[in-house]
Image (cartoon, coloured by chain):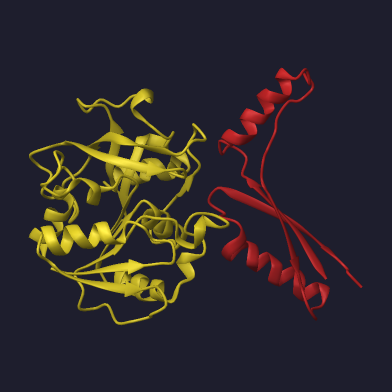
Chain colours: A red, B yellow
Amino acid sequence: MLAQIHVTFKEGVLDPQGKTVHHALNDLGYDEVLDVHIGKYLEVKLDSVSEEEAEIRVREMCERLLANTVIESFRFKLVSTE
Amino acid sequence: MKCGIVVFPGSNCDHDCYHILKKILNQETHWLWHKDEVDLSSFDLIVLPGGFSYGDYLRAGAISRFSPVMNSVIHLAENGGNVLGICNGFQILLESGLLPGALMQNHTRKFICKNVYVRVETTDTPFTQKCNDKLVLEIPIAHHQGSYYIDPHSLSDLEEKGQILFRYCDAKGSISESSNPNGSVGAVAGLCNEQKNVMGMMPHPERCADPLWANTDGQSIFQSLISQS
């Protein structure tokens, strides 16, 4: 099983990289761009766990290590690799 | 004062701290290897030095906080022992939950290495009690992730409880946007926990504490700790 994890800044936390890319896209003429958020994408390969177990354990991984929940939020999807 | 300096893979200010504490201030100073979970109860001060522990992978301090030595440091801190985190050490203290908030990339998106001024906001802590005579200190910073963040409610809580020790300012002690190098909320450069025995700061006092150099402002922090022990 593969956990596809996205970690991004929480709403209201300043994202200077996102802001810079936003302005760059506007400068290139993409006026429709309203906002850009830059985050991290992680793929975590899992062995011999049920989907229910994986759901609990990946959430725990995110809370304990992969995201700093003071400033970041996370979301993930579990994909079967068989 | 018996001091311990933690060495993580990637620490690079550990020798500077050792030099100041042992050679300049003549304190008993020991190295603590990150893999060793040891009894620290005989120590008066533990320093988490600056650097790039674990290459700053994932987030600065995120991996180091799980080093075995951190169990000992957390145990000591919970029992009232003094812990000082400088730069990367500050990031580790935040990641470990010993201090509130988080450090983010500088708002300029650049690594900043320069002398800055900080204003001492309280002398009622073991880390600042000798700062009475000089309220504005000139101390260098060198970091990429030094923009302090905490939600506005918790920030005013820190202010009320006197947990903010240093704010970025100009040479005269005034605080403005231009004197805040990295975009920290409340211009916070250093803070402590509610019990006031754990302190983290982004500026490097160990880089301005040797009398061979013109600036020795950093000494007041170490002298505060020595006078207490």
Looking at the image, residue B64 sits to the left or right of residue B228; the answer is: right
Indicate the position of residue B86 as horizontal and vertical percent values: 32, 53
**In the displayed structure, would residue A63 be above or below residue A9?**
below
Q: Quadrant of residue B6?
A: bottom left
Vertical relation: B16 (above or below) B214: below
Q: Quadrant of residue A24?
A: top right
The answer to whether residue B142 is left or right of residue A79 is left
Q: Quick one: quadrant of the N terminus of chain B?
A: bottom left
Residue at left 64%, top 62%? A62
Q: Position of residue B131 (x, y in %)?
A: 13, 44
Count the labels in the image: 0
Q: Residue at x 54, y 54 (%)?
A: B59
- In the image, what residue occupies the spot 64% across and 68% down? A60
- Residue at the far front in the pictured view: B212
Coordinates of residue B136 in the picture (x, y in percent): 18, 34
Which residue lies most toward the right here?
A: A82
Q: Is residue B203 left or right of residue B185?
A: left
- Quadrant containing the C terminus of chain B in the rendered view: bottom left
Of residues B188 and B65, the one nearer the viewer is: B65
From the top left corner, tell me how far across and down residue B192 is, in percent.
30, 53
Q: Residue at x 24, y 59 (%)?
A: B17
Which of the pair A53/B172 is nearer the observer?
Answer: B172
Q: Quadrant of residue A32?
A: top right
